[in-house]
Amino acid sequence: MTPTSVAAKSAEKFPTPAKLTVTLFVNGVERKLAVAPWTTLLDALRQHLDLTGTKKGCDHGQCGACTVLVDGRRINSCLALAVMKDGAQVTTIEGLAQGATLHALQQAFIEHDAFQCGYCTPGQICSAAGLVAEGRAKTPDEIRELMSGNICRCGAYPNILAAIESVLAGKAEARS
Amino acid sequence: MNNFAYSRAADVAEAVRQIAADPGAKLIAGGTNLIDLMKENVARPTRLIDISRLPLSSVEDTKDGGLRIGALVLNSDLAYHPQVEARYPLLASAILAGASAQLRNMASTGGNLLQRTRCYYFYDTATPCNKREPGSGCAAVTGINRQHAILGTSQHCIATHPSDMCVALAALDARVRATGPGGERVIAFQDFHRLPGDTPHIDTNLAADEIITAVELPPEGFARNYTYLKIRDRLSYAFALVSVAAALDLKDGRIQEARIALGGVAHKPWRDREAEARLKGEPATRDTFARAADAILRGARGFEHNAFKIELARRTILRALSQAAQATPQSQSDKRIAGPTTAENRSGRPQ
């Protein structure tokens, strides 16, 4: 069988659907892109919009490196199809700082030495931003449990916990 | 992932029309399990019908005093819903025992019911699997079967249903509302998932052209005496080796009604109504609970790597019923197992 006939047979079985136009509001900026139905939100961010801060770890929703905020809530972008998020507000690690001022979590991760290789860090910080917004975690046990979707193979967990605790404490102080 | 076409359904009727017209199509809502299976080449739909925008995201009181949960209510929204926290804390606890915060923010109520097993051999397309490829055989029966079932198995399949939420729904006697070309019907939760038998490729009794629209809870939520106790290989974000949803109605220390549902041990959330009925009128003591555990597990059968689950399940049932009776439900963030520390518990404590 020649390569051409393989391609023809494959095309017959799976006709290539037309690309679809999707509008995403990424870090506050309206972005229109043409994607295939099977393009994940993660691949759309990294490969179509060159926002490579969001990392691809396992690509199966097990490691959390791809965590971004969609309409304010943390999700695994590797398990979301870009076409299904048409019209959504997406916040990635690139969108957390205000100009030259780091987000409180970014600053806390530096101050607490909450990473070693750094690969999981964008996902950890976006996940922590979701956790802070949810307002469910108050104790170290609760933070650990609600951050369990983010794996750190360098094992920086104690310092990640300390960084998130310090931001939660800062918020509590600001309220009192 | 293989190529596929994508369409959106404007309403439930259109979604039913689309799925009925295309046998190669699959519905997608949260996608947390389906997209994973598509990446592994286990699921190969030629079209995805996006139902995530259908108006099925509300939680409402039913006329009989129960609760109707729309099929698209997110797992996180359901776990933290004030009505669920107050009236059905067993359900809230079970949901929070499962997956991760990110996944619970994506996964839908209906999708949770329809998730597939996490059996390694089902996922590995290089091995035989009667669930993935009917008639090809079961690699798990003689393979690494530590995670697999001990109750209701067949020679064709020993996979488990992976859900935590469904274990609570089984204990609560939930109902599933589904719409198909012939209209709407209600399926009792016990009749929704199937045992493998000789058709392990069919997980549920939902027809291919039907859509889950809601899950309904009856008025009784066992909000006082309940627990969801999940035992697993790591403290969070792992599937259950054994889990138990226990709910009791107690009066003067005697059991009026008992519900015991097991996860991680069978092809569906496992209940033994006969064993539950025998608890009626009995004192809520360890002896009573031990007899119930033995009755539930009398037909259990272990395989090479999972025989430990029989004793683990016995202890987990015992501890869960004690937790429920004492109104000390298991915390899902403090991982110390709640309950009395008698000498027997200290020596045989499930960790």
Image (spheres, helix red, strand yellow):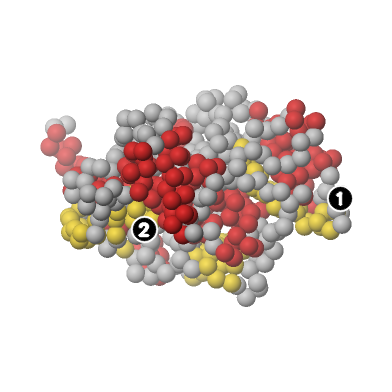
User: Under tag 1, what secondary structure?
Assistant: loop
In depth, the one of A137 and B257 nearer the eye is A137
Residue B324 position, x and y percent, is 73, 49
Residue B115 visible within the image: no
Q: Amino acid at mark 2?
A: Gly
Q: Amino acid at mark 1?
A: Glu
* Numbered disc in front, either 2 or 1: 2
Q: Residue at x 42, y 38 (%)?
A: A160
Q: Position of residue B318 (x, y in %)?
A: 75, 40
Which label is found at residue B326? none
Disc 2 to disc 1, how far (Cα)?
50 Å
Residue density around tag 1, few if under 14, some if 14–19, many if 20 or more, within 10 Å = some
Residue at the spot 58% in from the left edge and 55% down from the top edge: B92
Quick one: SS at disc 2?
Answer: loop
Residue B29 rendering spot, x and y as whole percentages: 40, 57
Q: Which residue is mark 2?
A: A72
Query: Are tags 2 and 1 found on a single chain?
Result: no
The subunit carrying tag 2 is A
User: How many residues crowd mark 2 within 10 Å: few (<14), some (14–19), many (20+)?
Assistant: some
Q: Is residue B224 left or right of residue B37?
A: right
Residue B282 numbered mark, or none: 1
Q: Residue at x 66, y 39 (%)?
A: B337
- Tag 1 subunit: B
